[in-house]
Amino acid sequence: MIHSLFLINHTGDIFLEKHWKSVIGRSVCDYFFEAREKAVEPENVPPVLQTPHHYLISIYRGKLFFLSVIQTEVPPLFVIEFLHRVADTIQDYFGECSEGVIKDNVVTVYELLEEMLDNGFPLATESNVLKEMIRPPTILRSVVNTLTGASNVGDTLPTGQLSNVPWRRVGVKYTNNEAYFDVIEEIDAILDKSGTTVFAEIQGVIEACVRLTGMPDLTLSFMNPRLLDDVSFHPCVRFKRWESERVLSFIPPDGNFTLMNYHVSSQNLVAIPVYVKQSISFFETGPCGRLDITIGPKQTMGKTVEGLMVTIHMPKAVLSANLTATQGTYTYDLATKVLVWDIGKLNPQKLPNLKGSLTTQAGTPKPEDNPSLNIDLKIQQLAISGLKVSRLDMYGEKYKPFKGVKYLTKAGKFQVRT
Amino acid sequence: MSASSAFNDEKGGSSSVGEPEYGHDPASGGIFSSDYKRHDDLKEMLDSNKDSLKLEAMKRIVAMIARGKNASDLFPAVVKNVACKNIEVKKLVYVYLVRYAEEQQDLALLSISTFQRGLKDPNQLIRASALRVLSSIRVTIIVPIMMLAIKEAASDMSPYVRKTAAHAIPKLYSLDPEQKDQLIEVIEKLLADKTTLVAGSVVMAFEEVCPERIDLIHKNYRKLCNLLIDVEEWGQVVIINMLTRYARTQFLNPNMNESLLEEGSGGDRTFYGSDEDEDEDEEEKEKKAETPAMAKRKPYVMDPDHRLLLRNTKPLLQSRNAAVVMAVAQLYFHLAPKAEVGVIAKALVRLLRSHSEVQYVVLQNVATMTIKRRGMFEPYLKSFYIRSTDPTQIKVLKLEVLTNLANETNISTILREFQTYIKSMDKDFVAATIQAIGRCATNIGEVRDTCLNGLVQLLSNRDELVVAESVVVIKKLLQMQPEKHSDIIKHMAKLTDNIQVPMARASILWLIGEYCEHVPKIAPDVLRKMAKSFTNEEDIVKLQIINLAAKLYLTNSKQTKLLTQYVLNLAKYDQNYDIRDRARFIRQLIVPTEKSGALSKYAKKLFLALKPAPVLESPFKDRDHFQLGSLSHLLNAKAGGYQELPDWPEAAPDPSVRNVEVPEWTKCSSREKRKEKKVEKPFYSDSEGESGPTESADSESDSASGSESGSGSEESASRSESEESEDGSESEEEEEEEEEEKEKKKKKKELKKPVQESESEQSSEEEERKHQRKTKQRKSDSESESDEDEESESESSQSESEESESEAEVKKKKKAAESKPPSKPVKKESKKEKKEMSLLDLDDFEPAPSPQVTPVNTFLSNSLVTDLEGLSLSDTVLSPATIAPSSALKNYELLHRITGEGLSVEYCFSRQPFSPDANMVAVQMQFTNNATADTKNLHIEDVKLQSGMRVKEFSEIELLPAGETATAVMGIDFCDSTQAANFQLCTHTRKFFVSIQPPVGELMRPVFLTENEFKKEQEKLLHNLGQLMGMNEITEKLTLDMKCRNEHTIVQRVTTAANLSRVPCGSDKECRFAGRTVSSSSLVLVTVATKEEGAAQLTVNCEKMVIGTMLVKDILLALTQ
């Protein structure tokens, strides 16, 4: 299926290549470079390219292109999903997925790739199995390794691949047994000029951090599971239980993982926590424009809105911004034409305001389109949909684990049109 | 080659690792000498004795490979280390080998023997990795070795090794396509595998090697459907895609009736004026095509197998893996009844939250789906709204979907959305939006004028691209009703002064020419202006100027004659030959001369013919003839290796091909079966109720004849499957079972009666049995005196076995009475059978009124009947057996009656000493002739064995009359290995290849030791063999199954798993067992020490490590389930 993989940085250097079948020359990437040049932004490179003899499927992650070479029919999502899994694994191992990190750990990365695919077909993609075979570097181990000359290859064999719960290591031991669940909800919304909601929905995810000894069998139940409209699960979740009882029953993987993603049914009205008053205008005469933005709380359920941030992609013609903010700081990046206003905590008594003038390039016509505002915010201790975890039970082990659930609401793709 | 040069520049920074590849020629200059030196230094490190140096060298070499530098000249130095003890070095050497073996074939051969050794390793993971590397080495010379290794691994007892074998198949195939036939055989074998681990990989191999052999799937179809949910996600994708294709060939179109209905009502397809004619045409065609089919069409009933597939894939829509979700979505799109396809919309919309590449692919597929099934995505319209931060390609695709979704109810919202898009900064996107508006306008008559007005307003946009695009779209719209819009045409005529985009100018000119009657005053003036600028125009504009001139000449020759002549003269000398040709052609056509023939009379008709309005259609129309989700669909072109999605068959092929006659479990070892069972219901919370009794039946009830208990558990497994689908009935059933348990004693009494009535044969059998029991009793008496527990245990179980047997007997008679049993009673009977098996001694004759009896899988009934028949037969046969089978015998199938053409053979390990040769394991075989003709001269031929193994054949059975059974005993010396003994079973007409593979527990015979002796031996084993210290002991911690916490059951389960005898012991916390392997008489000592809460520790001491490890696993399984 997947024939070869090339890792390419944003300047177009191939800094790692791996072939699972016979070797394919680098020149195949030229087709990709061609497409890369045509697309102005790296995001705009088509993920699937056709060349005379091969097909190129690529993803763009962390300023890197993961380019895979395919020779025959294969579901493109299969490859894309796998490439993202590679990126995830690298991130999981080294904390980030960047060129520098991969170059520093080139041998480990190469070994990972070797284990993840066999003849182009995924073999071991479960991070738990991989970590058993190739240990992720830690500071202590890297010191030991430099002293003893050992590497990170595990000397045990991947028994995890043989088990029925391939996502969990056997023989896990902790002195403090704890299980934490973060219910994180994101509001995706589009507001129009007048502030009315064009579209809004809530997407949620439950991130878990489970450090429990042995083989615990957990059951997580909700007060109001009816809210959940569409869900997707980590493979550990027993689907039947969910279907019949609406509880999450699972033997968790060890460590951090995403337990489930959900979508809140669209019947429920979405509370929009903030409102935005804005006016951005450019004048026909003279190279200038005006900007005036005020943000205020709308439906915050009595909680404080934090981490408020406004990002505006200005038209190309805007040269500089001369603004004053009553709260927080703003920056304008000349190269990318992005205006960022970092507000912080929203004070309902004194609404933050950003006001001032914009300078446009002389001689160019005034931009017709007003840029839209992208809003970022956070509300702690609140799941905006009202979802509540009712209880977490553990079976199969004797000890009493420490349990915790945290709620967080964030702005997802929250856009205000102007 | 900007990439590679840039790469070389950057290399300066990465100092540690090797240098470029152009250092091949030593004479090429001093600069490379250092390079050579460096490689020398690597070689030195590789040759050293220190593992750390080797490791360092290998790391540097692998880093070179990763960076794409040539390290091939190090091959000899590296390959030497393939046998290195250090596992880290070894792994890196493997990496190197796989990369360069193809280039250095001769040297690569040096490493082969290492892998061959690895293939024989007792550790399954080492076997697997050896096979993996061996098969990855692309050296043609080793093809036969690979073939052999794959074949062997395909019947390995470890599912992981079998998985690796499946992976190796496509590798070998790509290396040597000539091996296809042999590989197909292996694939066929692996397809029958029942473990989830293997399923995905073997289907992958199937798809790469022989996707056309869809017939191989028949027998495995239901199994694949049932296993699907527990296969790893990548395997799921492959299996689902393959099953989609399979279903298209095997089932009927579930929508054929609906499409009929739709044709009548018009459905939602005929909303739009413009499409109407076309659609009707299509429908007409469809109708014509369908009439013959319609004639014989019966009301559609979905094949249960079709339903099974849909039902079992649906939960996977909840997968976290986008590829799996997409695979299920395309399956539903291609296979599900129209009413059910809707479920996929939600999942696909969810994927739109994922990475942009995922969005890109999903949107492409959604776009195709929306054309056929618009209603499905309508509720999610807003999810396709575009954000300014989306990448352009995503925006365009979303736009496409929005356009496809537009109808007269939502068009106003969509148009409002479009209005905001038009103001976007992304001009490509704006252009696409204008196109989309045009399409909405053509599709939905009501908004045509609104759209047109909106577009006309765009004509005054400052961006030329926007204007140009609008012009092109307006042109298309105007064609629909030009007479109404002469003012728009006038407006556009004015635009010729400003617009520079050639396509737009050409469009305007075409419009004016086409509708010059509506603008009689302006048209000549436009031509005048154009004539002036003719020489500076682009080619497409020039062509349109000529067209305009010609049309005007024909309608209004008075005003435009001279202008036309002028234009044509200019064109005559144009640089472009197209334009020159066009000019000449038009001159001949329109200007009447004596030479111009009859054609010029028709010039007006030619030029001013009514032109049909263009249909603006989606580029995604008809893309669905490619399987959705495929690369070919995405590219809209057939990719290499793409398998066409076949059309639905007119009439359904025979569904019985999928009936699995053979409960194939007999072929796999008990361990596997258990494992698989566990896999089959990981959501055990649901089926715990049954799985408990099922499992216990498996181990407790070995008393019953093996095949019976086996089939029982098999049935109950499949029953639990069917029940999983209909939750809810479970609890009832559980209650019922409890009730039954209460009543069982009473019923047992009732049972005795029919037993006593049974015929003489039966009673003789019983006598025989009693006799056997006595002898056994005596034996065990002599062996151990303090072993009362075990004895009573075995006795009770034996009596149980008797009962169940006799019951089967009765049943058989019953069946014989009703020669043609209607299906329903049979089902009930089977149900009974199941129960009896699962609760062991629950001999319940009244068909209990159980609500869950209505079996979903009716197909089971057939095979059940045959099973039952086989069962009862095999029971009667036990009586003339000369060898007394102990209570805990399990029957294995050697030859099924289908493959054996009526002859079926089962075997069991009788656990009796084989008198001719004490080093052999006695295998008792039982032949049943189910055919109508007699079978003669049954004997064994062509025995193929691993070295050291021996076989003592049974004496030839000269005649086996139809319907009769016979038994024979053969001895096999397995040399204390679990390698299978392969041989041919010959009759007077046929030969059958068969193989017997012993479970490790059968490779030993019990020995009697006292506790002290046991401890002494254990000590000896532990310490005497200096260098192997500790290797002879394997300890494993385990948690005992709830039902297995008393001594009885432990003893029973262990002795069932292995042919060992119990060692008397003072403590009740420990059970000890002892035995010797049959061939080499190595001592096997087993200790199970129990602690509180079911925790226990299992210790096995054995000189033969392989035996020890395997035994540990088997006993572990026996105790934990």
Image (cartoon, coloured by chain):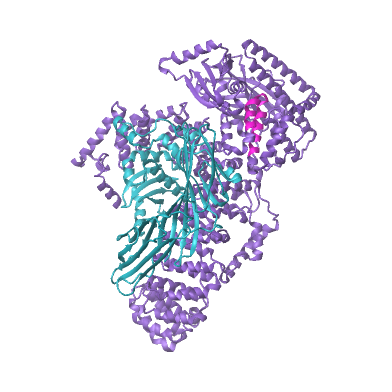
Chain colours: A cyan, B purple
Does the segment drawn in magenta span residue B970?
A: no
* Spot occupied by residue B783 in the image (x, y as percentages of width and height): 62, 11
Vertical relation: B849 (above or below) B706: below
Please say if B296 is above or below B688: below
With respect to residue B611, does B687 lie above or below? above
Which corner quadrant of the image does residue B721 belong to?
Answer: top right
- Residue closest to the eye, B451 or B982: B451
Seen in the picture, residue B694 relative to B1079 is either above or below; the reply is below
Q: Quadrant of the C terminus of chain B?
A: top right
Q: Is residue B802 left or right of residue B86?
A: right
Q: Which residues are magenta?
A: B692-720
* Residue drawn 51% across the image and 42% down it: A235
Q: Is residue B358 visible?
A: yes
**Horizontal side, residue A270 vs residue B427: left or right:** right
Residue B703 shown in magenta: yes
Q: Position of residue B243 (x, y in %)?
A: 57, 46
Judging depth in this view, the residue of B529 and B934 nearest the camera is B529
At a point 24% along the width and 36% down the height, the residue shown is: B38
Q: Residue furthest left?
A: B30
